[in-house]
């Protein structure tokens, strides 16, 4: 704000707070120590560091004043701790600027929808910018109707977190601005994700099964719920002799003959391993690299069973990056097929390939081109030959980081969910059973949060609802975005709404025989496997599988 306040300012601010639905403050939780700043004064700074710096004054209960000021967490003194001084400190500027001069180190955004954590909302004041500024920390949900902000509001108050409605921001004539030197945080999943979008299946006998990797031992773990029974968990490395795995997450499957199984990569040598249990048999394991010549893998694998009963395992060759198919027909032996050499599928990068089977019998897989991030689809019609195409060139699909998920709904529409590697937006590229490809930005059009971590986990419910589960890059909240069969897209925050713990984005989803939608996620705080579920009649609930079933911590 201006260095000298006025009664007019106080009245205007009070009116704005009244419009906002009264800014509820959040109790400070003092911390014992703060990390040394990663940024330099007036230098590049990540959004997370901006919020950490802002939180420091909340924790210290720094009072609003225009002299003397206060120190930041590193001991640097800021001569004012008013609204603009607060922003200056959070941005790690060299001195406390005013509401007017903050414009000299930032630029105005197009709309509130462009805001990201660490940006500011500055009151326009007829172009004078002479009233008040707050630091934007995020929207409270996907509707973007309530903003969480950091603010130093007035004399007699201290730095605090507040909540302002979108209508209050509009009525108060706030404008969104972004610091010139802010940079997005680098987001990455664990080096060895132990839960992935193909991690959960419903077995032929109705068992709900999820495969994970034990953080302590690297052992393959299965957690399951028999029909009418209680949760159980077993160590398949002990039970079946499955090798310690590495790389990507386990990929599960159920064959037409009732065989339940999972594919992993051996941590010792990259060999592709299959662990399986016939419908009426015991668990066993075999080495597909030794036994059938499957190429060594980085562990990024996926599985698909088509209408003929053929089991397909798509993997990435860790030597040359080639996309590979190892497959077992319902009658016959295993074979290998190099999709890069034989079809022209680009060398891939990022996450596991995302496989699918369309209603017309077309088998396919979606990958990201390692050279340019283009979304690639490789497919084989039921009675045709393999082919490949570039969805980025051909239909405008955004470039991707390789974190992909697929679903085919009852109408036959093929949906490919991806994360835009430029801006982190959740995107849908889809092909109706009759018609051409289209793209739909879920972040722009629905409000799905910018995502992080693992691949989006797609699902189709029995009532025709299509959806996808992701993790919010800003805070790790578990997010669900969905479209009823005859409705519009919507999104909600399962962490806020249901209490699901924050996650690193490694998730899976599965639809039970009774229609229950189950979403599994890895808690980023403790590595526990969490189940969040929605019965066909009822409301969402969540449970910790470490306590419910004894599932070991995930790496």
Image: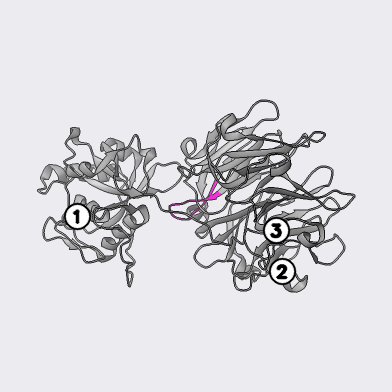
* Separation of residues labelled 1 and 2 (CA atoms): 55 Å
Residue bearing mark 1: 94
Q: Dot 3, how many residues are within 10 Å of its Cα: few (below 14), some (14-19), or many (20+)?
A: many
The location of residue 171, given as percent across then percent down, is: 28, 36
Evaluate if marks 1 and 2 touch, with contact meaning CB atoms under 8 Å apart: no
Residue bearing mark 2: 243
Is residue 461 visible in the rendered structure shown here? yes
Q: Which mark is residue 373?
A: none
* Separation of residues labelled 3 and 2 (CA atoms): 14 Å
Please give the name of the residue rendered at 70% of the width and 65% of the height, measured from the top-left corner. Answer: 222
Q: Which mark is residue 296?
A: 3
Q: Earlier in the sequence, mark 1 or mark 2?
A: 1
In the displayed image of the protein, which residue is found farthest to the top? 435
Q: Is residue 282 left or right of residue 233?
A: right
Evaluate if marks 1 and 3 touch, with contact meaning CB atoms under 8 Å apart: no
Query: Which image quadrant for residue 207?
Result: bottom right
Q: Quadrant of the C terminus?
A: bottom right
Please give the name of the residue rendered at 13% of the width and 46% of the height, measured from the top-left corner. Answer: 2
Residues in magenta, as a range: 470-480
The location of residue 89, given as percent across then percent down, is: 23, 56
């Amino acid at each position: 704000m201006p260095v000298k306040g006025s009664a007019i300012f106080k009245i205007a601010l009070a009116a704005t707070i009244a419009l906002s639905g009264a800014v509820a403050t959040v109790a400070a939780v003092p911390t014992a120590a703060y990390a040394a700043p990663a940024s330099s004064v007036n230098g590049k700074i990540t959004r997370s560091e901006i919020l950490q710096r802002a939180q420091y004054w909340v924790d210290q209960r720094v009072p609003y004043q225009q002299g003397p000021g206060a120190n930041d967490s590193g001991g640097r003194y800021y001569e004012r701790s008013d609204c603009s001084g607060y922003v200056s400190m959070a941005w790690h500027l060299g001195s406390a600027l005013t509401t007017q001069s903050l414009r000299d180190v930032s630029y105005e955004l197009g709309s509130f929808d462009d805001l990201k954590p660490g940006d500011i909302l500055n009151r326009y004041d007829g172009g004078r910018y002479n009233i008040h500024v707050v630091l934007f920390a995020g929207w409270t949900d996907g509707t973007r109707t309530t903003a969480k902000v950091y603010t130093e509001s007035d004399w007699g108050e201290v730095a605090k977190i507040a909540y302002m409605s979108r209508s209050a921001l509009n009525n108060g004539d706030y404008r969104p601005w972004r610091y010139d030197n802010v940079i997005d945080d680098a987001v990455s999943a664990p080096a060895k994700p132990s839960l992935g979008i193909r991690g959960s299946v419903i077995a032929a006998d109705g068992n709900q099964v999820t495969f994970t990797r034990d953080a302590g031992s690297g052992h393959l773990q299965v957690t399951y719920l028999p029909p009418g029974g209680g949760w159980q968990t077993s160590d398949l490395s002990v039970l079946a002799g499955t090798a310690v795995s590495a790389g990507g997450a386990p990929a599960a499957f159920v064959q037409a003959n009732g065989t339940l199984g999972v594919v992993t990569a051996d941590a010792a040598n990259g060999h592709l391993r299959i662990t399986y249990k016939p419908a009426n048999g015991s668990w066993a394991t075999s080495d597909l690299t030794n036994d059938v010549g499957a190429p060594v893998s980085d562990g990024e694998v996926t599985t698909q069973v088509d209408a003929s009963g053929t089991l397909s395992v798509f993997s990435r060759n860790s030597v040359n990056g080639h996309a590979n198919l190892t497959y077992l027909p319902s009658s016959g032996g295993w074979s290998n097929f190099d999709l890069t050499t034989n079809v022209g599928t680009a060398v891939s990068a990022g996450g596991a390939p995302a496989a699918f089977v369309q209603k017309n019998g077309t088998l396919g897989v979606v990958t990201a081109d390692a050279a340019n991030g283009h979304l690639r689809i490789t497919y084989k019609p039921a009675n045709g030959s393999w082919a490949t195409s570039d969805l980025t060139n051909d239909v405008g699909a955004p470039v991707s980081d390789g974190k992909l998920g697929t679903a085919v709904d009852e109408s036959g529409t093929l949906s490919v969910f991806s994360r835009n590697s430029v801006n982190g937006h959740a995107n849908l590229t889809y092909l109706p059973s009759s018609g051409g490809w289209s793209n739909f930005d879920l972040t722009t059009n629905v409000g799905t949060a910018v995502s992080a971590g693992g691949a989006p986990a797609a699902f189709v419910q029995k009532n025709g609802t299509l959806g996808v589960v992701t993790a919010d890059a800003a805070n790790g909240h578990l997010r669900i975005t969905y479209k009823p069969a005859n409705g519009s897209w919507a999104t909600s925050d399962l962490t806020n709404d249901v209490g699901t713990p924050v996650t690193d984005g490694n998730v899976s989803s599965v639809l039970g025989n009774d229609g229950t939608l189950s979403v599994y996620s890895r808690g980023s705080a403790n590595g526990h496997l969490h189940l969040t579920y929605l019965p066909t009649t009822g409301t969402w609930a969540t449970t910790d599988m470490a306590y419910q079933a004894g599932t070991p911590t995930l790496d």
